[in-house]
Amino acid sequence: MITHIPRRVALKLITAGSGILGLQTAPRPVAASDAKDLSLTSVGNWSKTPDRVWLGEEFWANPMEDWRITEGAAECQSAAGNRSVHLVTHQLTDSDASFRMQVEVTRVAAGPKDGGAGFRIGVSSDLNEYRSNCFAPGGITAGLTNNALVLGGKRQELTNPSGDGPITLDVAGSPEGNQYSLTLTARAHEKTLGTVTQTFRRQAILGNVALAHNFNTPPNKPNGSRFRFRDWQVGGGAFTVTEDHKFGPILWSMYSLSDTRSDEGYVLKLSGLTGPLGQQDNQTLQLQVQRDGQWETLKDASLDTDAWVATFRIANWDQTTETPFRLLYQQKWTNGETNDYEWTGIIQAEPEGRPLRFGALTCQNDYAFPYEPVAESLRKLAPDMLYFSGDQIYESHGGFGVVRDPADRAILNYLRKYYQFGWSFREAMRDRPTLCLPDDHDVFQGNLWGEGGKAMKDLDAGTSSKGGYREPVRMVNAVHRTCTAHHPDAFDPTPAEQGMNVYYGDLVYGGVSFAIIADRQWKSGPERVDTGSGRADHVMDRDFDTSKLDQPDLVLLGERQEEFLKQWADDWRGHTIKVLLSQTVFAGVATHHGGYDGYLKADLDCGGWPQTKRDETVDILRRSMALHINGDQHLTTVCQYGVERQRDSNWSFCTPAIAAGYPRWWRPDEIGMDHENRPKHGLPNTGEFEDGLGNRVYVYAVGNPEVGTKKNRYEKAHQKGSGLGLVTIDPAARTYKLESFRFSIDVTDDDPSNQFPGWPLTIQQAENRGENKLS
């Protein structure tokens, strides 16, 4: 079904404020104070920061892995072009006022082509929002290259070249009629080396400001020079300064709370994440809780120096009481001074005597970063728990490509991308239990066939259809820790192959038991079979007999996870209702992939292959009567699995992507797939089917997207079927209410079009073993 953003939402996007769309009202006269108030203040603490990767809480470095604090300055380690450091606390918002910036620049290594160093001014995305601006192209360049000043399109040779010594670049701006005038000056040893002035459209200066490194060389050619920046100073009324935009040193936290049904009672596990610190930095976080109005220290925890996560485990937690917490970090500076930083949140009291509201999200492609409509929906819905089912990152996040080797560089490359996830959703995560699963793109693979942790062979063949892990196990373990260090203890923590850590296990909270599994970590690789298509994981021929792809030695979950699920299905201590959490759906509920006409009979990446193991898994699950909540597909569906007959097993809710990238559709009616027993609602593409792999599946609802054509990122995400899921789990009534919300809507206005067609719906617990009520 083709869907459009409702007019009321489109109007909200347009009228939400001129800052969002970069609109400008008529200029006002410049106040006298504007012109005079150009005193400069240093930003950051580089001069007293130990050598390290992370530049500090005021900055976003593009890309993070290419920057270091070295001898009290920010130094780019790459000779490639278009590197930058954004100042996230300061945005140019008032073109009726003046501003000024300066920084000391030193060339530390000359390259074949001097790409220059200086500032970028007015860096603005389609939203003109400070986080999204960090990844926007453009802006006005104001810098020095090849003994010449460059200001926008104007170039001025230096009158007194200074060689490689430190040069102070000073840029000042002020309104000039309907234009805005910028003047760039270079100085060394109190001597002016050159100056240049240029006027611009007023709107052109609005947005972020950044340091620009090799602004005159291509981003993928490492033939430029390398520069060091020291003592960045800013001032002026044109800036809006927002201290709350700081990101760090404690970036965010995640926690879980689970009834162990043992002498440890409820166990709290909480992780705090920092940016990558240095050897001379303090590498410890402290956890405190507030009781009777006083802060009480519980314990300290060391940061894992790959993942930069500190994890706290507290047994016998009082789950009946809402408890404020804070994480403390003491920054030790090179001059002997210290500063204390904190990150606060609330450990909620366990829901009791009422349903549990469970927010379910997946897949965030960063074309829609920072996903504010979804984050706003979460704030309004205020679920009791959050679940991110994977693909917190994609390889393309933030630009600058993928660093696959060596492991330490790959980890930094991953962390920089992962930090965009926390930057978007940390406010939602700080005050409620959160579960977060890694998936294929999180470990830099288009698809993941983990083979129990084996290393991938033939690394040059791509990462989408080869078994094993492409990345070094050290990097994979760091990914697992960033996502799951705060999860309950693993059912069996024995590492998989190569020493790869595992995270499958259960969590009991609010009268609900959740089984957490990794449905790709042990899965067989598709090169074990022949799809006849030239690509090992795709069946493109409609007449291909997919039963040939089902072989007795193939693996889906693996023996270890199967044994866990068997025990979990029979264990009813401390709860009355169950949920299975995994990365993807155990059926092939997509007929078209990639493009609107991209028909695909079967995709082995779904949990419907291998078929026999899929059926065995569903057989185990039937005993549990668990609802299966998953993601990955970028296509929201509600379906019921069948093994021996249609609708004899568990229901699945595949949630919409936070921001759908690669599109999928389920359009069986269009291609003439046989079906029976369409639901009473009569929606197209629903009913009892055999998917392309021959699995029985009853499709109750599907949220097919449009082809994404809009230029505005949020409108495009809405077109592509993005959004979030909410499941209200009632342990007393033993029901699950499923809701699937679109991307750009107001979840509080009760408009039926806020949800995809077929939602909301309520499933009875016993329907997960085939005792069906819904029709």
Image (cartoon, grey):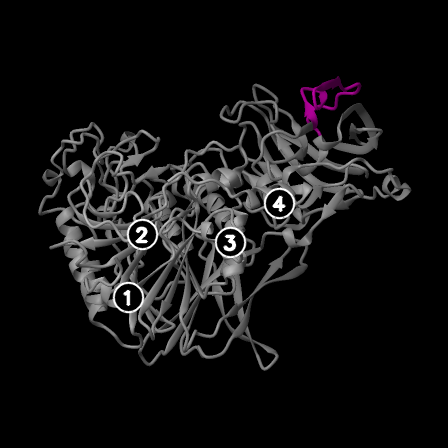
Three-letter amino acid code at the position of disc 1: Gln
- The CA distance from mark 1 to mark 2 is 18 Å
Q: Give the percent coordinates (x, y) of residue 180.
A: 79, 30
Q: Which residue is mark 4?
A: 59
Question: Which amino acid, by three-letter code, is at mark 4?
Answer: Phe
Say which of marks 3 and 1 sits in front: 1
Q: Which mark is residue 681?
A: 2
* Contact between labelled residues 2 and 3, with CB atoms less than 8 Å apart: no
Describe the element under mark 4 as helix, strand or loop.
strand
**Label located before the other in sequence (1 or 2):** 2
Residue 166 in view: no
Q: Position of residue 534 (x, y in %)?
A: 20, 27
Q: CA distance from mark 3 to mark 2?
A: 35 Å
**Marks 4 and 2, how far apart in space?**
52 Å
Drawn side of residue 574 relative to residue 710, left or right: left
On screen, 619 above or below 687?
below
Residue appearing at x 62%, y 29% in the figure: 138
Are the residues flagged by discs 1 and 2 in contact, CB closer than 8 Å?
no
Q: Which is more toward the observer, 68 or 559?
A: 559
Check disc 1 and report the residue beneath it.
Answer: 764
The nearer-to-camera label among 4 and 2 is 2
Q: Secondary structure at mark 3?
A: helix
Say which of 93 and 493 sits in front. 93
